[in-house]
Every structure is written in structure tokens, then in C-alpha cells.
Image: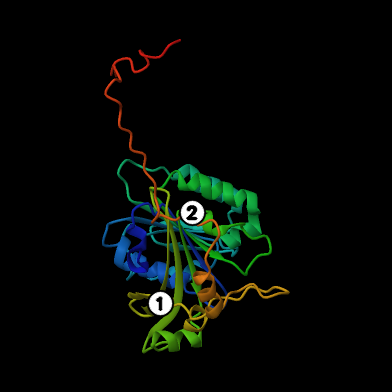
Amino acid sequence: MPCIETLPVLTGAKMIIVDEAVDVMYARQLITGWIQYIWKKEDYDVNLLTFNDARCWHDNTLFSTKYTVHDSRNIDHKYRLGNLYYTSTTPLLPLLQRVLDETCIEENSRTTVIVDCLSTVILWAGLTKTLQFIKQLSTRVSQIVCIYRRDLVQNKIPDIMTLGTTYVRLEKLELDKIKRLNTSYAGHHMSSYIAKLSHKKLTGSVIHQEELVRQNIKTYEIESQAVVHKPNQANTSQPAKIESSFRIETNTREMEQRDKTPLPYTVNTANTSKIFYQPDDADDIDEDDPDDDLDF
């Protein structure tokens, strides 16, 4: 089964969509945990393409030397992040084309591109240009991870859960789930939230799983446990009644009467008949031609 902790190295996780909302903005925190404990250990090239404030990602103690930031914020000064030096006043569409031109996958390479975030690109470039860019970019790198904020724009991506190979929907940990899972909302330096996973396997089948995620906000270490939904006993104890204008169900007494009532055309298997044929002595039976003695 898929696990949120090791999701980026799951077989077939070519494009991961992390869907968050205003009340559960943990996508950056989750991806930072992947950078620290998955991609950094596996020696991946991590490229961050940010259309928001890149300074929130600027923590070089977490990232490897292969970590690169492409920033497109609308401010008027230059600054250095990672190992590239960019001016953030570059127009968006030329920047997208430049990223495509400069990105080329090498054989057996491990290149991951993080897009932060799709909703911002939609606001600036439109839905069509955004989807075209993501499709072209996914063919040039080994893996792409996109942050999507479902409540940011009106022009939403239809069926966002089917855009990539893996879809992660982050939801707020409600009080009823805290009681049912017998867990605390958040411990010391910990944040808790729900992650609903959908992963398309190479065989074509789709895996669905819901997990409770607890993540350290300082070290970004991820812990998770599967959420098991138990059926409601009140609903399973009695079958649902069919609404009708007359009674169609059968009670126990009527069932007994039905079983004891003899039917008029029931086959009586006890009384059977058999035919015994004894040929006469004068009969000349030819096994090859039984009709040889007939006169015609």
C-alpha cells in the first residue's frame, strides 16, 4: 500500500499533485520533508519553480547542493537562491518557455521539479497555457510535483485528481476524527492533518488510501498511520426498508406457511415407473441392422 512518507519513490509516481486549501496549507511542509528524507538521500536533482515567495523555501540546511530555485516573483530587485542568479521581473510566459528549453532529461537521471503553485500560474497565464506547460515539462524530467490550491481561483482544473499519476488531497483534522483515531491534534513542534492518496499503478489499477499525517515543523520528519473506516453498526444491523404504498415484505409466519403449502405441479420423485422389455425367442435381432425383420 502507498505511504505518504515514501510516496515520491513509489513505482509510477511520475506526476504528484498536492492539493491544499487555505485552512490546511501543509503542502510546502510535506514537500520539504520529502526533500530532506527522500530526494536528498536518493541523490535527486531538485528544481523549485516558484511563482510565490521563494524565500519561504530558502533553508540551505535542508537541501542538497543540487537544489536549484527558479523564481518569478514580481519584485524589482535581484537576489541569489541556490546556485542560480535570476531577476524576478521576467515575464511569465517567456519564463515558462525558458524553463522548458533549459530542461532536458538525461538517461538514468533523477530530476524532480517542484511547481509552486499551479493556481498562481493559472491566474497569470490561464488554464490552457498552464496545462500545456505542465504536460510538456512532465515529458522532460523524471518527476514533477505540483502544489495546487483548490480554493484560490475560480477557473479550477477539472478533475484535478486525474491530472497526474498520484494525487494527494490535504484536509484539516477534524475533532470527530481526533476522537475516533484516539490521537491528539498536535504535539510539541508537531502539526497534524489528513492526506487522502490516489495512486495509479503501472497496471492501470488505482489505489486509494487515507492517512493521518503528523509532521515535525522543525525537522520536517513525517509520521503517518492509515485511517480505517469502520461500517456503522446501526446501519448494517437492519436491512433498509423499501418505501412503497403497500406491504411487500414477508414476515416469519408467512414464510413458514409458504414452505408447508403443497404445490399442485410438484414432481413426485418417490413414485417412478420403469419399462422392462423381454424379447421373444423367435425374434431375430440383428445388432448391426435392428430393422432387418420389418416388412417394408
Where residue 185 appears, x then y in whole percent? Answer: 43, 87
Question: Which amino acid does the dot numbered 2 rest on?
Answer: Gly
Number of numbered tags placed on the structure image: 2
Q: Is residue 64 above or below residue 289?
A: below
Q: Quadrant of the N terminus?
A: bottom left
Please tell me whether mark 2 sits on a helix, a strand or a loop.
loop
Is 195 or 59 nearer to us in this picture?
195
Q: Residues within 10 Å of mark 1 (few under 14, many from 20)?
A: many
- Cα gap from disc 2 to disc 1, whole angstroms: 22 Å
Q: At 65% across and 60% down in the image, what residue appears?
A: 123
Contact, mark 2 vs mark 1 (Cβ under 8 Å)? no
On screen, residue 33 versus residue 247, left or right, reads left
Question: Which amino acid does the dot numbered 1 rest on?
Answer: Leu
Q: Quadrant of residue 199?
A: bottom left
Residue named by callout 2: 164
Q: At 54% across and 76% down in the image, what residue appears?
A: 239
Q: Is residue 238 visible?
A: yes
Q: Is residue 252 above or below residue 287?
A: below
Which numbered disc flags the more N-terminal residue, 2 or 1? 2
Where residue 172 appears, x then y in whole percent? Answer: 51, 79
Residue named by callout 1: 212
The disc at residue 90 is none
Q: Quadrant of the C terminus?
A: top left
